[in-house]
Amino acid sequence: LADRLQGTIQRIKGKGKVTEQDVKEMTREVRLALLEADVNFKVVKDFVKRIRERAIGQEVMESLTPGQQVIKVVRDELTELMGGEQSKIAVADRPPTVIMMVGLQGAGKTTTTGKLANLLRKKYNRNPMLVAADVYRPAAINQLETLGKQLNMPVFSLGTEANPVDIANQAIEKAKEDHQDYVIIDTAGRLHVDNDLMDELQQIKANVQPDEIFLVVDAMTGQDAVNVAESFNEQLEVSGVVLTKLDGDTRGGAALSIKAVTDKPIKFAGMGEKLDELEAFHPERMASRILGMGDVLSLIEKAQDTVDENKAKELEEKMRSATFTFDDFLEQMGQVRNMGPLEDIIGMLPGANKMKGLKNVQFDEKQLSHVEAIIQSMTKQERQDPSIMNASRKKRIAKGSGRNVSEVNRLLKQFEEMKKMMKQMSNMPKGKKGKGMKF
Ligand code: GDP
Ligand code: MG
C-alpha cells in the first residue's frame, strides 16, 4: 500500500497548485491500494469519495500549500478509517476480569500476554494472573512461566495433559481465591486457521465468558493478517485487535483494512520483543507512517521517555525551527544512545525511508564514535554553520578525527538531509502537528 502511495504523494507534495487531474490521479492510487489490500469495496468507495470532495473543495484549493493540504486530507481520512484511539481494557463488575488471547501461532500471543499483564499492573495497578492454555507445545508453557518469573506474577498451568477449558475454569477459581483481579488466558494457535482450533477456542469462550477477546495479529504478514482477523472475528466475535511487530519495517497497511473489514478496533501495538514494548494504537500516527511521513510523534514521545523533558522540548523547538546544529547533534547523541538503535530513531523521521543513503549506512556503536570524533574535530564555528565547510577544513577535520574525508563528507550530507527533513516537519499543517504531544 505504502509503496503505491509514495510515488503519487511525492509528486503532489511540493506542488504549489493542485489540479483536479492531480486529485483524480491521487484518489485512483488510493482506491487501487485499498482494494488491493482487500478493504471492503463500499468502504473504499466512500473513502475515495470523501477524499475527492475535500481535496477538490475549498479547503485545499484555496490554501497556500495545496500539495500538503491534499496529503493532510488523505491522512485525516486514513486516521478516520482506522477508528479512534481505543486502548481501554474492560473491567468486570465482579473480579476477576477475564481476557482471552487468540491468534495464529507465532503472532505474538504469549509475548503479548506478558506485555498486557505488565501494562495492567504498571498503568492500572492491577494484579494479573497468567494462564497457560496452550497445551500442545510444552515449550509454550515454559515460555509463559518464564515471563511470569520475569514479571513476578503467578502463572496457572496444569501441564500438557489437561483440557484447555478445564485449565481456564480452574484458573479463574484460583484467581478468585487469591484475589487476582485479572486473568489473561494464553491460548494455542495453529499455523493456519482451522476448525479444530476454532472449536477449542469457542469452547473456552463459552465456558469462561471472557470480558475481552484480544486477537493478536502479526503486522508483518500484511494482507494475511486481514484475512486471519476476518475469520477469527467471524467465529469468535473478538473485542479488539493487537497488532504486533510494528517495530519491523512493515508500513502497516494491514492496520487500515482490519478495522474496515472486522469493524473491531485495533487497541494495542506491539513494538518489540520486550515486556514494556506494548503501546496504545494511535491511528493518526499509523496514517502518517503509512503515508511515509515518519512517525514524528512516536519519536518525540520516545525522546521524552528517555531524555528529560526540558531537553526534549528544546530538541523539538530546534527541529521545528530547523536551527539544529552539530553541537546539538553531539549533545543529543549521548541521549540518542539511550533511546535504542539509531536506525530505529532515524527510521521514524519523516522521509527517512526515501533516504537511500541513510538506509545503507550501518549505525553501529563504532560508527557513532566515528561521528562523534568527526564533530569534535570541528571548530565552534563549523559546528554552528557547516556551510562554511571547504576542502581544507574538511581535510583538517578528517586528520583531527582520524577518519577520511569521504566520511566527513558523508556526515555533512546526512546532517543536511536531516535538517531538510526537520524543516519539512516544521512546515506540517498547524493544529495537526501539536496534537497528542504532551508538552
Ligand atoms: P505465539 O505463538 O502467538 O504465542 O507467539 P509468541 O508470543 O511466542 O511470539 C513469537 C515471536 O514473535 C517471538 O520471538 C516474539 O519475541 C516475537 N514477537 C512478539 N511480539 C513482537 C513484537 O511486537 N515485535 C517483535 N519484534 N517481535 C515480537
Ligand atoms: Mg504462544
Image (spheres, grey):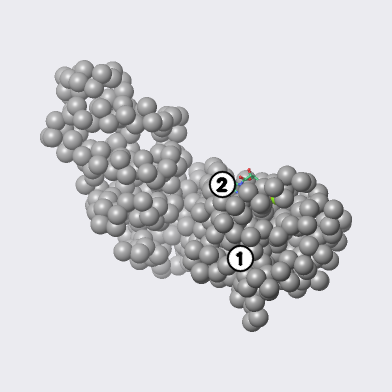
- The image shows residue 286, relative to residue 360, as above or below, that is below
| Left-right relation of 325 to 290 | left
Give the percent coordinates (x, y) of residue 290: 52, 51
The one of 248 and 28 positioned closer to us in this rendering: 248
Q: Relative to residue 126, is residue 43 drawn left or right?
A: right
Disc 1 designates what residue? 128
* 152 horizontally vs 183: left or right: left
Q: In the depicted view, which residue is nearer to us: 378 or 276?
A: 276
Placement of 7 over or under 198, stated as above or below: above
Tell me: is circle 2 under 8 Å from ligand 1: yes
Q: Which residue is mark 2?
A: 273
Q: Residues within 10 Å of mark 2 (few under 14, many from 20)?
A: some
Q: Amino acid at mark 2?
A: Glu
Along the viewing direction, whichever of 91 and 155 lies nearer the viewer: 155
Q: Earlier in the sequence, mark 2 or mark 1?
A: 1
Q: Secondary structure at mark 2?
A: loop
Q: Residue at x 59, y 52 (%)?
A: 149
In the rendered image, residue 43, in percent from the top left (x then y), is placed at 65, 65
Q: Secondary structure at mark 1?
A: strand
Q: Nearer the viewer, mark 2 or mark 1?
A: 1
Q: Relative to the observer, which residue lies in front, 225 or 253? A: 225
Q: CA distance from mark 2 to mark 1?
A: 20 Å
Q: Amino acid at mark 1?
A: Pro
Badge 1 crowding class, 10 Å Cα cut-off, few under 14, some 14 to 19, many 20 or more, is many
Give the total number of marks visible in the rendering.
2
Going 71% across and 60% down the picture, which residue do you hit?
Answer: 156
Q: Residue at x 47, y 48 (%)?
A: 292
Q: Which residue is pictured at 81% across the width and 51% down the height?
A: 160
Rendered position, 127 above or below 308: below
Q: Quadrant where the C terminus lies?
A: bottom left
Q: Position of residue 355 (x, y in %)?
A: 42, 36
- Callouts 2 and 1 close, C-beta under 8 Å: no
